[in-house]
């Protein structure tokens, strides 16, 4: 009998794209099992989703109970109970008390689209500014907002109009040496945004700036503080809204409940949430001020499945587990271990010469390798080509699943937030060995 993977390669749409042909059959905590009997340490969390590990017992129990109570309590007919219970749990953890009106949806991209609909309706303006390197999804609306790789939009035009791009304060994107100081990057990037508002999209036509506090698919690059503060100021001065996309950074990933808490002076007008909110059950949402949300006519946001009762029940259990299990403290401790190992590696003469940057926040950690084809990397001849995918493949050979990212040579590590010290040590050994194997 042909294996299921063979069936997959024949009958699953090529457009999905896959790193491996493995068939995942089980997930428990930090590990996944495959059809052919491998047990793999998961440093992807299914792209930042299973933040509490696979099949967290409390989340599983809550979902099981809800499945046998009420699966579909359609939200245009009334409230379903877990939807309201989840909002009750989310209210006290919002980064600011002004964020008090919620709309729950299914996926990250849908929630981003909902935030654009809100921004357009609430301001009466149409244009949206995003940063180069951003990722906001692959639906028809979000394709136009995603600027991390052309593959996501190429061949699908015409895309949603009214989207403008400004450079991110990151050396590659500003065409500056990678030794450029953060202050200089911020100043350059804000200047480019001010020019954009003078030359291409006037404030009177611009509804919002949409940004991830840490660029995710765009290379795991935390926004410098001065940049987000600058965006907040420019939005305020020009009657534009600031939309913070916390789809990947939210729910503890960066060591705070939401990454925007690392920037206490920056209060979002709209915040987008998904992924970690329900640890694998499809759920997303936006939150804003009631006064803004209430500008939309009843019935103009939503769809059949949004805020599904089972997903919301899982979401409630996630928020409870956060409180009970000291998740944020664990992120801090494990993050220091992972960063410590990577910074140590940088000190090795040969390996250090191949690394452009080690960066991230909390357990959202990336390494950008130098590339012989990159105009900004010194020591070109000694740096192997395609470092990130070679390291990724080496890690997988050693049973550690990782992800690469963006158009730069970046590999990213997204372990569960409750990973044990032992599993972190095991993964660190594998990463160290994999990089050493590729470089030597
Ligand atoms: N925004 C960000 C920051 C993301 O990382 C993602 C997914 N990687 C999305 C939006 C889209 O979410 P989804 O894949 O659930 O549509």
Image (tube, helix red, strand yellow):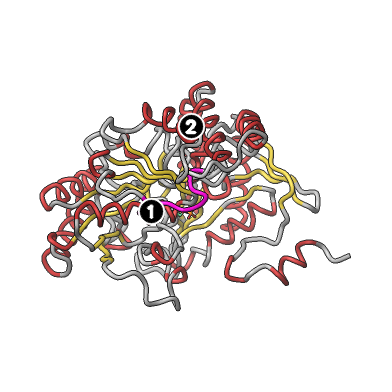
For the C terminus, the quadrant is: bottom right
| Mark 2 or 1, nearer chain start | 1
307 left or right of 189 in image: right
Report the predominant secondary structure element of the magenta stretch: loop
The outermost residue toward the top is 324
Q: Which residues are magenta?
A: 299-307
Which residue was labeled with disc 1?
A: 112
Image coordinates for residue 343, horizontal then vertical, percent: 45, 42
Q: Are marks 2 and 1 in contact (CB under 8 Å)?
A: no
Cβ of disc 1 within 8 Å of ligand 1?
yes
Q: Residue at x 21, y 36 (%)?
A: 265
Residue 84 visible in the shown view: yes
Image coordinates for residue 170, horizontal then vertical, percent: 30, 56
For the N terminus, the quadrant is: bottom right
Q: Secondary structure at mark 2?
A: helix
Q: Residue at x 62, y 61 (%)?
A: 19
**Front-most of residues 18 and 158:** 158
Which residue was labeled with disc 2?
A: 331
Work out whether 102 lies above or below 88: below
Q: Secondary structure at mark 1?
A: helix
Is 101 inside the magenta-drawn segment? no
Image coordinates for residue 161, horizontal then vertical, percent: 30, 70
């Amino acid at each position: 009998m042909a294996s299921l993977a063979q069936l997959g390669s024949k009958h699953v749409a090529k457009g999905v794209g896959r790193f491996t042909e493995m068939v995942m059959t089980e997930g428990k905590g930090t590990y996944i099992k495959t059809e052919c009997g491998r047990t793999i340490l998961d440093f992807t969390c299914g792209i930042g989703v299973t933040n509490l590990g696979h099949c967290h017992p409390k989340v599983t129990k809550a979902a099981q109970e809800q499945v046998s109570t009420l699966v579909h309590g359609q939200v245009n007919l009334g409230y379903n109970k877990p939807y309201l219970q989840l909002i009750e749990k989310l209210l006290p953890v919002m980064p600011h008390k002004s964020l008090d009106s919620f709309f729950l949806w299914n996926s990250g991209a849908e929630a981003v689209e909902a935030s654009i609909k809100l921004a357009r309706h609430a301001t009466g303006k149409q244009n949206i500014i995003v940063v180069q390197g951003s990722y906001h999804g692959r639906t028809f609306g979000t394709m136009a907002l995603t600027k991390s790789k052309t593959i996501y939009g190429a061949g699908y035009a015409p895309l949603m109009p009214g989207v403008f791009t400004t450079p991110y304060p990151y050396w590659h994107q500003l065409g500056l040496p990678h030794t450029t100081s953060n202050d200089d990057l911020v100043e350059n990037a804000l200047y480019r945004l001010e020019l954009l508002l003078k030359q291409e999209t006037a404030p009177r036509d611009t509804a919002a700036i949409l940004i991830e506090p840490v660029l995710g698919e765009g290379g795991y690059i935390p926004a410098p503080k001065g940049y987000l503060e600058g965006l907040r100021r420019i939005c305020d001065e020009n009657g534009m809204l600031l939309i913070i996309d916390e789809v990947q950074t939210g729910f503890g990933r960066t060591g705070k409940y939401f990454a925007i808490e690392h920037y206490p002076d920056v209060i979002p007008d709209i915040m987008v949430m998904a992924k970690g909110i329900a640890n694998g059950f499809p759920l997303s949402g936006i939150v804003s001020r009631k006064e803004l949300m209430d500008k939309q006519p009843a019935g103009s946001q939503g769809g059949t499945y949004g805020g599904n009762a089972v997903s919301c029940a899982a979401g409630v259990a996630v928020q409870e587990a956060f409180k009970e299990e000291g998740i944020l403290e664990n992120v801090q401790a494990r993050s220091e271990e992972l960063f410590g190992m990577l910074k140590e590696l940088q000190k090795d003469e040969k390996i250090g010469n191949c690394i452009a940057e080690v960066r991230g926040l909390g357990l959202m950690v990336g390494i950008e390798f130098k590339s012989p084809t990159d105009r900004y990397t010194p020591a070109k001849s000694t740096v192997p080509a395609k470092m990130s995918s070679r390291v990724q493949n080496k890690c997988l050979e050693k049973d550690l699943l990782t992800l690469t990212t963006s158009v730069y040579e970046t590999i990213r590590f997204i372990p569960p937030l409750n990973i044990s010290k032992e599993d972190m040590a095991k993964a660190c050994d594998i990463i160290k060995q994999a990089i050493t194997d590729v470089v030597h």
